[in-house]
Image (cartoon, rainbow, N blue to C red):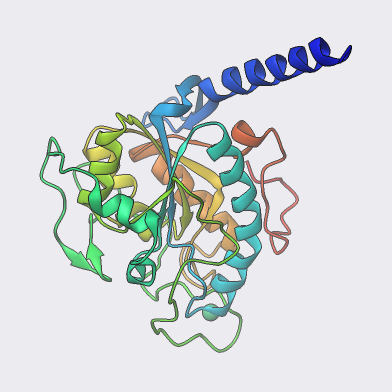
Amino acid sequence: MRNLPISLFAIALVSITTSSWAESLKLNLRSQSKNPANPEANIKRVIWESGKTALIICDMWDDHWCKSAASRVVEMAPVLNDIVKTARAKGIFIIHAPSSVVDFYNDTSQRKLAQKSPFAKAPIKLSTSPRWGTAWCWTDGKREGVLPIDDSDMGCSCKGKKCEIREAWKRQNKLIEIAAGDALTDNGQETYNLLAERKIDNVILCGVHLNMCVLGRPFAIRQMVKVGKNVALMRDMTDTMYNPERPPGVDHFTGTDLVVKHIEKFWCPSFNSTDITGKKAFRFTEDKRKKSRE
Ligand SMILES: [Zn+2]
């Protein structure tokens, strides 16, 4: 009994620490200058309220038609799961967005949460252009230049024989936990509803593939920027479909960095997962470049 006050003090201390922990995110948001005379990247330190922030996980499927792409997702998934756990504990709302396979989750509370969220009218008409099973936000010539990598071959990065394109995915990768209170959708309107219901202004995007779905899906960067959210890409938790044999002829990971910079220039800033976890940014084992990924 003599220890009780100390225990109570300890509990109080933990709860104070936890609640202040849950209040804010300190992000180092990097963007690229559009001014050729002053091409320096700009890093802006911002504080986002965790409770007004969502983290959307794009297309981290169980498999992919390209073997190299599939193995990179398997390498990323456990790291992303740890980041998501930390983000969730901070009070960030987690949306799993495994496009075209959401029916796999029809009986789950996370899918129902998205379906039951009340309709909220977006300030602009949401994209309805169909591509790959969802409504696509295409490249916007008024806002962005052409992508810095040629992905017209769909970007199989395997050496030698190229992988055959097929619908290889059935669900989200099992290594990413879908927890109570998370939502699951691949639909733009449902995503907008979920964010509006929770008065969420800030949206973090991660997952694959940056030059395709992380930009174009109806819950992804282009659409979220266009509806007026504060958007940021978690740049060490993404990958591209880029074949180094195609222009500009750089290695796969440099290709990804070029797309990150394209996004930072034309769409939204980016940050590393370090800003959420305090741990070192993720790097693929196959990325043998001397310079660490920035
Ligand atoms: Zn391949």
Q: Where is residue 49 in the image (x, y as percent from the top left)?
A: 45, 23
How many numbered discs, if any? 0
Extreme residue toward the front, this view:
1
Q: Residue at x 16, y 53 (%)?
A: 127
The residue drawn where x is 49% and y is 61% is 240
Question: Residue 205 falls in which quadrant of the image?
Answer: top left
Establish if 281 lies above or below 239. Answer: above
Q: In this view, does 186 lie above or below 173?
A: above
On the image, the x and y values in percent for residue 164 come to 45, 88
Image location (x, y in percent) of residue 294:
62, 41
Looking at the picture, how far across and down is residue 157, in whole percent?
Answer: 55, 74
From the viewer's side, name the closer residue of 116 and 6: 6
Left or right: where does residue 282 sit relative to residue 84?
right
Is residue 201 visible in the rendered image? The answer is: yes
In the rendered image, the vertical position of residue 106 relative to residue 293, given as above or below: below
Q: Which of 189 and 287 is in front in this view?
A: 189
